[in-house]
Image (tube, rainbow, N blue to C red):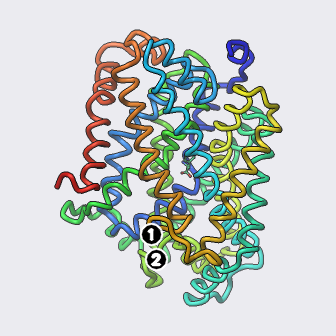
Amino acid sequence: MDSTAVARSHWSSRWAFVLVTAGSAIGLGNIWKFPYMTGTNGGSAFVLVYLLCIAFIGVPLLMAETMLGRRGQANPVGSMRRVVAEAGAHPGWIAIGFIGILGALMILSFYSVVAGWILDYAMRSFSGFAGLTKAEAGAAFAALLADPLRLIGWHTVFMILTALVVASGVTSGIERANKIMMPALFAIIVALIVYGIVAADMAAAVRFMFHFDFGAVRREVVLSAMGHAFFTLSLGMGAIMAYGSYLDRGTSIMRTAFYVALADTGIALMAGLAIFAIVFAQGLEPASGPGLILQTLPLAFAQMPGGAVVGPLFFILVIFAAWTSSISLMEPFAAFLIERFGLSRRAAVGGMGLVAWLLGIAVALSFNEWSGFKILGLGIFDLLDTLTTKIMMPLAGLLIALFVGWVMRRHHVAEEMGLSGAQLGIWLNVLRFGSPLAIGLIFLHVVGVIG
Ligand code: PHE
């Protein structure tokens, strides 16, 4: 295993790491999931808990997971194996790595189907949405969901796109794509915000998202918001650990984690504002669910000046954002297969991609042919989303916090983080007490054990 550590490719600079980690974090979670979840969870209550979770659970864990990857210098399972050995800890802790790679595989399967929706809309946007009405926008989305072949076709295209980059190796493939696309995405979201201010109801959007009312925070909202904080920062799924393993020593993990979280949260909030400005201006339903952005944005593109150009550009950039995230979902399991079983990169990617693709077909069918098929009252799409976001991610996060806070040797942690004194102390105490307590309480609260 040591030979792989020596031969391990690394990012070309610290900024490259910030960029690719932001590329993993910023994706459908920000542009598709955050707005619709904010809508279904009542707006500001969700946003508030989400922001608190990002700041107090997300950022400390982002630092911890990056650190584990850099210390371990391997795929998530290999990295955990090494840091667990170094700490002289019980091998059971290696489970953190397995939860991660398995969860990433599960997320990839539905992520690819949703990215397929965006591909479908990107294609449609080229012929423009001119004259589109509210009813037609809703019907178009429903028609897409009802068409298994179209869903599976686009899902297949997206999975192949993802596999192609991962097969060509992370540092060369991933870095290049990110450098141009992320800034471009930012620019176009700014443009949508401007449109929201000028032509839609930005005031209503701001009220909906930021008029904080603690009384409105319901049980399920808290878990949804915490789960989403994990999802949007790519936490607990081995992605950050895998990327951390390609990070050079000597880069400040604290600073990079801060930049990544800032960029990620900024994009999500901006996307939310842009979408809800249109939702309220058009009299649409904020709680309409996963189709929210696809039912609102085409209407805006139909009406705004230059919409025929802005529309396709937007959808293409969202595809790139999703692509850079899905790459980070495929990499951890692939790296595990390569390093553990000596598979070639191609074979590993092929195998992992095939399994995720098959699972994705089940997801696609859960919107139509198999819509009656439920496990625990949930369809396959909801089930995979719930299992990963609300259970596996917080659980992995909890274990990471406990492991780094209590089990790892303090001087190893300090050395790897390049931190000392108060900074180290505060962060470690958050991991020891803050994060586990918060995650634990939210779990207990939702299960109903505590009020
Ligand atoms: N953070 C990504 C997004 O917001 C999704 C993701 C989750 C990526 C977990 C990697 C690991 O779209």
Amino acid at circle 1:
Gly
Mark 1 highlights which residue? 377
Q: Is 113 displayed left or right of 54 in the figure?
A: right
Q: Can residue 184 be seen here? A: yes
Q: How many angstroms separate mark 1 from mark 2 (CA)?
A: 20 Å
Amino acid at circle 2:
Ser
Total residue callouts: 2
Percent position of residue 213, x then y = 22, 63
**C-beta proximity under 8 Å, tags 1 and 2:** no
Classify 10 Å Cα crowding around label 1: few (below 14), some (14-19), many (20 and above): few
Mark 1 or mark 2: whose residue is earlier in sequence = 2
Percent position of residue 5, x then y = 68, 16
Q: Is mark 1 within 8 Å of ligand 1?
A: no
Tell me what residue is drawn at x 43 percent, y 20 percent.
Answer: 90
Mark 2 highlights which residue? 288
Percent position of residue 392, x then y = 46, 46
Observer-nearest of 376 and 157: 376
Secondary structure of residue under mark 2: loop
Q: Quadrant of the N terminus?
A: top right
